[in-house]
Image (cartoon, rainbow, N blue to C red):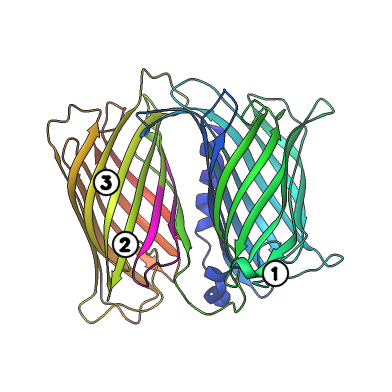
Amino acid sequence: MTPIRSTLACALLTLLVQSSPGAETEADRTTAGGRMIWDLADDLDLLGDVWADSPLAVWGQHELFLGAEARTAIERTEDGVAFDVRDVEYAFELGWRAGRAGLGGLVPSAFVGQRGLEQVDAVGSAAVRFAAFGLETPTYRGRDGGRRAPDWRLAAGVVFEETGIDADAVLRGDARVYPWDFDALGGFELGFEGRLDSLVVDGELLADVTLGPAVARQAADGRRQMIFLQYQRSRNPLGIGHSAVLLGYAYEQGRYEGAGRLRPPDVEGQFAVGGGDDDRFAATFHLLFDWPRFHREYRVSLELDGNVLTAPDTNELYYLWNLAIERPVDDYVLGVYYYHRSNHQLNSEDDGITSLNVLDFGVRTEGWHRVGYGTPPARWGELDSRVHAGVLLTSSFGEDRRWHLRAGVRWTAPLPNARIQPYLSAELEAGDVERYVWAVGAATGRAWDVRVEVRDDEQYFSTDSDAVLGLVRYGF
């Protein structure tokens, strides 16, 4: 069993923990975000970061949390659309965190984790597992909903298992300070951000150190946007492997003032892990970004759906992206979408990637992306759906069909007094290639979802395009 596989298998068992009565504040405690970074050196073109940190359960002022992050290193773009991914850095952390300051005015945490690097369309991987202790300022995650300076977090841990690399300890941290405010210009702040990500190897600290100026704008609800210019000095063997000037944009949702008020978050998503036939393993890291509305009716949204699926002959890594202009209308969302999918092989030799690009129009119910339910369905059950129809722009599969269709439907059974709400769902994608997902599952509370699904996907590299999987999903 590979390091990434066994660690996420442990996360699967952890996800089975039921939420406590304090679960109504869990959505308010989640932090998540993403960054698009231009690498100004010659080694790479782009870096794409996504991360999320969410409590699996809350007990008073304590929480059991799961954190995940991933960085995709892109060497070049083909026609500015398809990506040639070099590797993926990833990290998972599972542990305890205090809900308020405890040690000298700081928030303590203790956790186990794994950090690793997986080659894409090539053979090679390395990872370390560690146990760590962390401290952070009380406002690091935006608990007060206001502007904060300085803020930082720091964690140090001991490596207890390693693969493909010899390391003894990990040390990582983040810091930011924004001493200058420009309220007259819309609440912008000017300051500096830095990051330390390091391993101790044979007594030597091998660190990626990143530092530079940033312009940020933060709302009282924890939403934050930032443009930054940083220099990264790279020595960490699990990093990008070269020093570079980085120019980027970040969007994130932090904890906000007034926990307990239910509202649609600006960044939401889900973790999912599971396994199935032929000893397969599956993992999903899904994020949905909604920017503030413009012209009072419209909004820009970005959906990033990264998936890993192992197989006896090869391991799949595939991304689904939706960039949209949407307009909510009553209980529905209408939009124009640019849809991109690319498939790669993880830690496997490959002659190339496969991809397709689509421009389509779509409509979905507001609850389509929801995992778990806070209220019981109506008398005849709850029906969520989506339909997209459009034109194929480019494809690796011959472009024999210029039309493209995506659709899905989910029906939740009308069991208003049950803690577990069963459902049936089906999704399809048809056109130059076809993809189907059938599932039966049960939602519990506002965040948990357990399901069995059948996937049939023509874009898989594996000779077996079918997979039967059992999954546990946690939505935030």
Q: Amino acid at mark 1?
A: Gly
User: What is the CA distance from the residue labelled 3 to the residue labelled 2?
Assistant: 30 Å
Task: Name the residue located 63 percent from the left edge and 49 percent from the top edge.
Answer: 93
Precedes in sequence: disc 1 or disc 2: 1
Q: Nearer the viewer, mark 3 or mark 2?
A: 2
User: What is the CA distance from the residue labelled 1 to the residue labelled 2?
Assistant: 36 Å
Task: Give 456 or 72, whichever is nearer the viewer.
Answer: 72
Q: Nearer the viewer, mark 1 or mark 2?
A: 2
Check disc 2: other Cα within 10 Å, few if <14, some if 14-19, many if 20+: many
Image coordinates for residue 219, horizontal then vertical, percent: 58, 69
Instruction: Examine the rendering and report whether any part of residue 54 can be seen.
Output: no
* Residue under pointer 2: 326
* Residue under pointer 1: 99
Q: Nearer the viewer, mark 1 or mark 3?
A: 1
Precedes in sequence: disc 3 or disc 2: 2
Image coordinates for residue 291, horizontal then vertical, percent: 45, 61
Precedes in sequence: disc 1 or disc 3: 1
Seen in the image, is 99 located left or right of residue 252? Answer: right
Rendered view: 317 above or below 252: above
* Residue under pointer 3: 454
Question: Does dot 2 land on a helix, a strand or a loop?
Answer: strand
Residue at the limit of the structure toward the right, as seen here: 104
Per the picture, the main secondary structure of the magenta-coloured stretch is: strand
Q: Which residues are magenta?
A: 282-304
User: What is the CA distance from the residue labelled 1 to the residue labelled 3?
Assistant: 39 Å
Image coordinates for residue 468, horizontal then vertical, percent: 30, 43
- Is the C-beta separation of discs 3 and 2 under 8 Å? no
Quadrant position of residue 196: top right
Q: Amino acid at mark 2?
A: Glu
Question: Does dot 1 land on a helix, a strand or a loop?
Answer: loop
Q: Amino acid at mark 3?
A: Val
